[in-house]
Image (tube, rainbow, N blue to C red):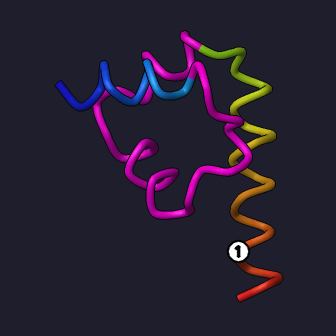
């Protein structure tokens, strides 16, 4: 199942390196609430903001 695979992979990846399209997929998916519970909400929000800003600034 894709949600379980992403959660498993997230244990080994820094959230700040997630691609922008994956971040938007997470925002729109039903698993977003589980992601926010799995990680500290503020940590996830900071990482998502950093990815979005870096993609905008360096696009």
Question: Which span of residues is magenta-colored?
Answer: 11-38
Rendered residue at 44%/21% (across/down): 7
Q: Position of residue 34 (x, y in %)?
A: 43, 16
Q: Is residue 19 left or right of residue 17?
A: left
- Give above or below for 51 relative to 36: below
Q: Is residue 25 magenta?
A: yes
Front-lying residue, 35 or 8: 8
Tell me the quadrant of the picture where the N terminus can be found.
top left
Rendered residue at 76%/52% (across/down): 49
- Give above or below for 24 relative to 41: below
Tell me the quadrant of the picture where the C terminus can be found.
bottom right
Is any atom of residue 33 visible in this view? no
Rendered residue at 45%/44% (across/down): 27
Q: Position of residue 43 (x, y in %)?
A: 78, 27
- Give above or below for 53 relative to 56: above
Rendered residue at 56%/63% (across/down): 20
Q: Position of residue 2 (x, y in %)?
A: 23, 31
Q: Is residue 29 magenta?
A: yes
* Residue located farthest toward the bottom when viewing the structure as drawn: 59
Q: Is residue 5 left or right of residue 10?
A: left
Q: Position of residue 32 (x, y in %)?
A: 43, 29
Residue at mark 1: 55
């Amino acid at each position: 199942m894709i949600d379980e695979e992403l959660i498993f992979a997230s244990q080994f990846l820094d959230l700040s390196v997630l691609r922008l399209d994956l971040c938007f997929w997470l925002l729109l998916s039903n698993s977003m609430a589980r992601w926010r519970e799995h990680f500290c909400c503020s940590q996830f929000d900071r990482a998502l903001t950093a990815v979005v800003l870096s993609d905008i600034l360096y696009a």
